[in-house]
Image (cartoon, grey):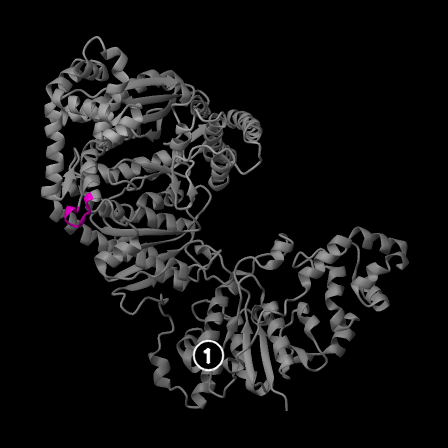
Amino acid sequence: MPKTITVIDTFGFFFRSFYALPPLTNKEGFPTGLLTGFINFIDRLHQDHASDYIVFALDAKGPTFRNEIDPEYKAHRPPPPDELKAQLPIAIEWIEKMGFKTLMQSGFEADDMIASITKKAVEAGMVVRIVSHDKDLYQLIDDDKVVLVDAIKRKDVNETECLEKYGIRPEQFTDYQALLGDSADNVPGVKGIGKVTAQKLLNAYETLDNVYANIDEVKPAGVQKKLREGEENAWMSRKLVTLRDDLFETVAWDEYDMDDRNPFLPIVPELIRYEMNGIIRKLKAKKLISEEEISQENAVQEAECPLPANAGFTAKLITDESELAALTGAITPETLVAFDTETTGLDYLEDTMVGFSFCLSAEEAYYVPVAHSYLGVPEQVGKAAASAALRQIFTGRVVGHNLKFDLHFVNHYMEGFEPSLYADTMIMAWLAAPESALSLDKLALLHLNHTMISFKETVKKGEDFSGVDLADACGYAAEDAWATWRLYEKLTALLGLQGEHLLEEAAAVEFPFSLTLGAMEEAGIRVDTKVLAVFLEEAKERLAALTQNIYELTGSEFNINSTKQLGEVLFEKLELPVVKKTKTGYSTDEKVLNALMEEHPVIEKLLEYRELHKLVSTYLDPLLQLGQQRPDGRIHTSYVQTGTATGRLSSKNPNLQNIPTRTPLGARIREAFVAGKGKKLIGIDYSQIELRLLAHFSDDPTLVDAFKHDKDIHLSTAIALFGEEEAPKKRSIAKTVNFGLLYGMGQKKLSDTLGITTKEAREIITRYFETFPTVKSYFASIVERSKEQGYVETLLGRRRYFDYDKATPMLKAAYERESVNTVFQGSAADLIKMAMNRIDDVIKKERLPATMLLQIHDELIFEADAAQADALGQRFQSIMEEIHPLHIPLRASLNIGAHWGELK
């Protein structure tokens, strides 16, 4: 006797069960019709289907290869009823708990799994019984070797049944569907061809190939015309309906053994909960369970969230809105709440919140799903209940990890309510160790010795969090909130040991600053896409001309953007002198090209090409695309508060801080950033802020006098270095020296920058420190302090640490430069943060008609009503200049214009 394998078209069977049975519910009102049909089917398996093997085929989440053939495939299927969706995940979970195996593969449907296992089984000499009511599987019927089983009607479907029902043989079924189409799956077929015509065509010509090979003979003429017009759709439809049967090279049949054990014992609690009374009675009759076990089992159980064995806390899924209201209703202004969100992606403008987690103690954390969207997802918390809960949560002392990100999504649920931020563990970790890794995973491992559940293990490749099963989502998300809670405790203690002032600085400046940045990100800045489009077209035309110039001057065509090809052309074909070689070949960086300027006329063209190509690829193309994506034409950057050790902000997606300013081309890009209708842009730029800080910290009399009397500091430095007569001509040198020494510029760098010899550069630096001895001694004191203490501090006491003991000589020299740089650049960052917080507070409290849009290092850009732009600009300027007492005055320049290019 050949062995038999039973293959279940799982979703197909579930759908059939759901619609075949009355709308049953348990005493809680939870629908149980599908579950009842499933349990009855499993119970009948042994008596109805004598089978050696059994396997359940499942559809994978996400698109399949058929969506690549036709994006409209299954695009308009109506969503299944909520009662069905609520039962599906339970039934699928039961399959695994009962010990049955499933087949699923990303990019393919359950039918492809069935076709592939069927092919292997037939090759192995088995009889295949496919439990399904899906006509797509008729193509697999093979006499009595492969039959379909209607589990509801308890009827087998073989070749004879197929011929009686459809008038065609199973091997003709894909061609039949290709002609007929399938409106349920959005398979187009040939428009106008119905069942009868499709049968007649296949009875006459056998196959679709023969139909089209003999198209001239097809009668009547109307059918022929339809076939000709619909030929493309016919071939595409056949591709869509043809099942893949080549997905398995080998099959381990013993994994699918259908043994004689009772499958229901592992799910007894669920059988009781969902009142599967028929099966419970059978289990009792067989004395497999007792009355006592039933009475002890709680029919209403809390949802389990899988966690690692050593998690140290419990995770609870909250889908009951009254339970959520009760939990959050207990939160007071003194309650510490760790909070996190799960989203469909990182773009708050396009993506959405899927759920949120919160933690109120070190023992338990909760996950609240709001928008999971996979097939069979249970009922979740509605928007109104979620909004009420979030409002209540944010009356407490909310702690998050990069909470600025979460608030972008939370804001959609908080209309008219401005959430607060009590603390942020990412910022705290950055304050404690500015150059360490700041991800929650790494911090949990470092400070809690806890390995977090992996995102990659939770969310399948190519999918997002909305497709994660609620139980898995609960464990992952609740752990984030719990880890944030625990980290807050640890980092509070750590920062306290390093200095209480760090906790004070965090609360007074850094945490509020995160909210300030969040508001700026949401505001965005408008770009004139027409200006960008014109500039882009001009730039591309110029690039094309430059490309031809370069080809003509070098006598060859090559990839100008390829360092390797360019190097070969310059140094082998043109035989220009080699300036520098690297491990990968000739260097062609900007410094090398500048050194070759006099060697060949192509060098000038190459430098222009590179500048223009960078503008196009880095700025013009991306900015134009971003501007065109939004109806209001506004671009929204993201600010990274913890991205640098000094404390300066960085900007990404897109980076608006690095748009060139010194070239005419860069300036043209800025002209595309414009004020909205009836508004003006305000630009306020701190003047020489780091040099002013040098005067403040060093108390150098020359510097202090220059700033107190609003003298030209660079001219004053030039006079001190070169004398009255030479000073005007050498002001630019003095400026380079003034700023360069703050960043640890040595004689080599100064000589390269100014185009002078290293001897001349050394003499200038020596003269500078002789002229400003207080500055030299202050620089030395910073370096000495960094070595003694192991850190330096900024104006507000933020620290940057240096481990000199483990450093190489080269690294020690770098630490010395960075210690000086950190004091000034970090203190400048402190000042502008305080100013931004103060201005943001004033705008909100007084409801001023102005919005802070951008921070470009020492410059702030606002958008304001045109009529009040002058008054508001002056007010903001005053705040910036008076934000913190220094020994010398702070000064900021004010400019107002219709676009960024006018803010000079």
In this view, 889 is above or below 574: above
* Residue found at the very far top of the displayed protein: 725
Residue 641 location, x and y as percent?
29, 39
Q: In terms of depth relative to the viewer, which is nearer, 410 or 55?
A: 55
Q: Residues within 10 Å of mark 1 (few under 14, many from 20)?
A: some
At 82% across and 66% down in the image, what residue appears?
Answer: 202
Quarter of the image where one finds residue 441 = bottom left
Residue 6 location, x and y as percent?
59, 80
- Is residue 544 found left or right of 898 in the rendered image? right
Residue 403 location, x and y as percent?
31, 45
Q: In terms of depth relative to the viewer, which is nearer, 495 or 711?
A: 711
Residue assigned mark 1:
99
- Is residue 639 found left or right of 770 in the rendered image? right
In which quadrant of the rendered image does the C terminus lie?
top left
Q: Is residue 16 magenta?
A: no
Q: Where does the magenta region start and end?
A: 803-809
Q: In terms of depth relative to the viewer, which is nearer, 294 or 62?
A: 62
Residue 82 location, x and y as percent?
51, 60
The number of numbered badges drawn on the structure is 1
